[in-house]
Image (spheres, rainbow, N blue to C red):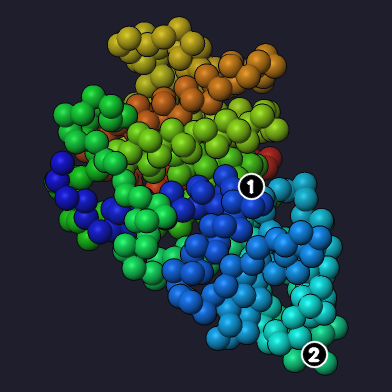
Amino acid sequence: MTSIPKWVSLLWQEHKFKLLLLQSPSERFEELFAQVMRCANGNSFHVARTVGSLGDLKCDGWDADSKTLYAAYAPFSAKGRSDVRGKIRADFYGAVKKWPEMRKWRFVHNDLFGMSAAVTRELEDLRTESSHLDVEILSDWGPQELWQVFRGVSEEDRLDILGSPALASDGDVRIWARETIREHQDVHPSVIRASTSALSFLCDNFQHDSIFDPLLSSVLSRALTSWWLGDETLFAECLDLLLECSNSSPFEAQITCMGFLMRCVEICAHRLKIPPDILIRSQIEGGLDTQEGMKVILQIALEEISGEGEGFFLPDSGRARDNFIQGCAKWITDFIGITWVGSGYPAIFLLQDLVTSIQRVEIGEGDSWPVA
């Protein structure tokens, strides 16, 4: 295998890191946060451990040099945002009481899309209430801020925690793409690097008021980016998280995956200069070794795009739901690969168009979606 360019390794590490943050239960999130801060701040950062009935003394990490105390909260849950406000208040005043030498306090979380306005309001209220105290309440840190801290540590430290991408070679049958798509001979490497950086930002840019669930959309976008990198393992890990999320929000998961697939078909058809229904039919009728269940997914997409669909909802079966989600993701990668080969339009640009276009879909929008 050829050496992996640094920018590819960094992109892979960012996706892996944020996936770990999203997957982490409370204790694992605190451990990962402590690992990052120990790498960044060295011996000045002290890991807080729970001690019997004393608990963690409202401290999930302490930096001795800056006298900063960190309070970590995970896992992110849209239903639990109101609970976060109570935790912020309890953790802050608890820390003030138990750590009189504290001069700075920071709230750390794994909400990929930023804390709600209500939480921001709570932090500002605390700043006003505690103005007489000699403690500065710093801005909150989420996955993006933690990644910026972690990106600044040594390559060796990042490798110790995350490992490195196991990118398949062109001849490896395990690669998801039928063709190698990580490099494009007619596109300058600097353009590809800029595109991957932009795509990474876009994966985090879904909004809470979007027609599609922001967490599900972000995870699916990262799965597709991992596929573009040629890393089957990370692709599968992202899909596993998507399947886990679908257990609590099955309808949202199905709508999100089908929405991505439909938009992908429209974008690819636009680049191939053929109608979307013709592109879908070409795979239903002429796709090689296509399982019947995979064809059903395309049939649903065809009915929805043609305006003949009457809505859909899979049986309350975990296996059927998992197969549907995995099938949608696989069809998206297939259509992007087909379009790249057929039109010469780079796959990384198709991914950018797809994610950007999904973020422009608004509630109440008509059947005709704008094509990037």
Whole-percent x, y for residue 299 in the image: 50, 14
Q: Which mark is residue 133?
A: 2
Q: Nearer the viewer, residue 54 or 12?
A: 54
Q: Answer left or right for 324 relative to 231.
A: right
Q: Spot the residue most to the front.
A: 52
Q: Residues within 10 Å of mark 1 (few under 14, many from 20)?
A: some
The quarter of the image holding the N terminus is top left
**Residue 6: horizontal and vertical position, in percent?**
25, 59
| Residue at screen point 39% across, 71% down | 152
- Give x and y (percent) for residue 261: 48, 30
Determine which residue is flagged by label 1. 25
**Location of residue 34 with respect to 199 vertically, above or below:** below
Q: CA distance from mark 2 to mark 1?
A: 33 Å
The answer to which of 26 and 286 lies nearer the viewer is 26
For mark 2, does the 10 Å Cα neighbourhood hold few (<14), some (14 to 19), or many (20 or more) residues? Answer: few
Amino acid on which disc 1 is placed:
Pro
**Where, quadrant-wise, is the C terminus in this rendering?**
top left
User: Which residue is located at x 17 percent, y 50 percent?
Assistant: 3
